[in-house]
Amino acid sequence: MARAGAILRIAIRTVGELLVTFSVLLGLFIVYQLYYTNVIGRQDMNREVGVMQRQWMVAPPAHPASPSPHGESAPVVAPPPAPALHDGDNVAILTIPRLGSAIPVLEGVGLDILNKAAGHYPGTALPGQIGNFSVAGHRKTHGEPFRHLDEMRAGDLVSVETAQARYTYRIDADPVIVQPTDLGVVDPVPGEPGARPTESLITLTTCNPWWSSTQRMIVTGRLIATSPHAP
């Protein structure tokens, strides 16, 4: 009996030590996810913004302005022909007053991209082009560029800056929630597969709710102004 009791005490102590170790590791993981990935993610995003701005200082001159279909006082800067983009290529810098800091946009929506920037959906329009310029971003962890996307409201402005121009989009409506399988939200004409686009649109997407990817939160808008970018 004494031997059995000793074995039981050892087993209980071992299980207790394992539970404590597991709790410590779980706590460290939570700190890593909630804090450290955001610190590193924001550093990565700031670095990407800096890289783009330095490249644009030596970019070719912007296209000349011409009368604007988006407003009598807004000059048009025709986007250059779409380049062949590869994952990780620079696309633009988003500035959204409602969300705060400047957000770099890189080509691609894989985790390697989204962990350091917002991602441009391959195949969708580029900034200023006719079609649907579509961008995805994390809502939690890794810099959280779209953490407060749920606070966007109709009438908010989104500035999209490239080497050639700054494009200003106005948000059409408050955020909407869709299923992850609803890929039509990034179609050239959202919700109308195969339709030929006639407007320059923007769609911002992120996961919903926090800590889950069971839904998608969508914010949409359209181009209202274009101005040359002076490096």
Image (spheres, rainbow, N blue to C red):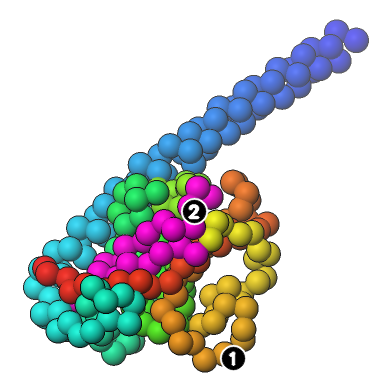
**Within 10 angstroms of label 2, few (less than 14), some, or many (20 or more) residues?**
some
Locate residue 9 relative to residue 27 in the image: left or right.
right
Task: Tell me which amino acid carries mark 2.
Answer: Arg
Q: Is residue 72 visible?
A: yes
Q: Is residue 138 left or right of residue 5?
A: left
- Residue that appears at 41% across and 79% down: 200
Answer left or right for 22 relative to 133: right
Left or right for 66, reference 116:
left
Residue that badge 1 annotates: 194
Towards the viewer: 33 or 48: 48
- Residue 61 inside the magenta-drawn segment: no
Residue 161, x across and y down, in percent: 26, 67
Q: Position of residue 114 (x, y in %)?
A: 44, 60
Position in image of residue 52 (x %, y %): 21, 65
Which residue range is magenta in the image? 150-172
Provide the residue designation for mark 2: 153
Q: CA distance from mark 2 to mark 1?
A: 29 Å
Instruction: Please name the residue shown 50% across and 64% down the image.
Output: 172
The residue located at (62%, 78%) in the rendering is: 191
Measured as percent of width and height from the top left, residue 155 is found at 44, 58
Mark 1 secondary-structure assignment: loop
Q: Which residue is at the front of the view, 164 or 65?
A: 65
Which of pointers 2 and 1 indicates the residue nearer the eye? 2
Rendered position, 123 above or below 145: below
Q: Residue furthest right?
A: 1
Instruction: Look at label 1 and name its amino acid.
Output: Gly
